[in-house]
Amino acid sequence: MPKKKLPNMSHWTDRQIAEFWAIHSTADYWDDLEEASDLEIEKQSKETVAVRLDKQDIQALKTMADKQGIGHTTLIRIWIKEKLEGAVSKN
């Protein structure tokens, strides 16, 4: 079976890339992958924000996040980033 061609992800968001790899196997694209060397990960400083939510909303968040294989706080951060990116692109 011929290997698939890896799409150009340079214009994709982190979420789009994560969604792609969630449903595709690296084995299908092995010849297109490069070994990562001298990889530097810049850790962004973060602050904690307390938000009060109803119990049923928290449970709904956890259920939705579980379906995506992520934590509920990660899902909240993704949604906030998406909303902020949308607001910035409209200005």
Image (cartoon, helix red, strand yellow):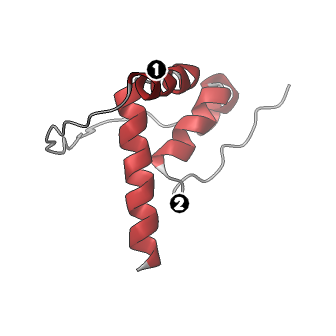
- Tell which residue pokes out farthest to the bottom in this image: 91
Kindly identify the amino acid type of the residue bearing the numbered disc 1. Gln
Q: Earlier in the sequence, mark 2 or mark 1?
A: 2
Image-quadrant location for residue 17: top right
Viewer-closest of 37 and 60:
60
Left or right relative to 47: residue 86 = right
Q: In whole angstroms, how far apart are the C-alphas of marks 2 and 1?
A: 34 Å
Q: Residues within 10 Å of mark 1 (few under 14, many from 20)?
A: few
Image-quadrant location for residue 23: top right
Mark 1 residue element: helix
Q: Quadrant of the C terminus?
A: bottom left
In the displayed structure, would residue 10 be above or below residue 23?
A: below
Image-quadrant location for residue 85: bottom left
Left or right relative to 78: residue 46 = left
Q: Which mark is residue 59?
A: 1
- Tell which residue pokes out farthest to the right in this image: 1
Tag nearer the camera, 2 or 1: 1
Residue 88 spot, x, y in % from top left? 38, 71
Left or right relative to 33: residue 80 = left
Residue 49 spot, x, y in % from top left? 18, 40
Q: Quadrant of the N terminus?
A: top right
Q: Which mark is residue 49?
A: none
What is the tally of numbered marks visible in this picture?
2
Query: Do callouts 2 and 1 mark residues in contact (Cβ within 8 Å)?
Result: no
In the displayed structure, would residue 4 be above or below residue 16?
A: above
Q: Tell me the residue that label 2 is attached to.
A: 11
Q: Residue at x 46, y 46 (%)?
A: 14
Left or right relative to 4: residue 15 = left
Residue 33 spot, x, y in % from top left? 54, 36
Kindly identify the amino acid type of the residue bearing the numbered disc 2. His
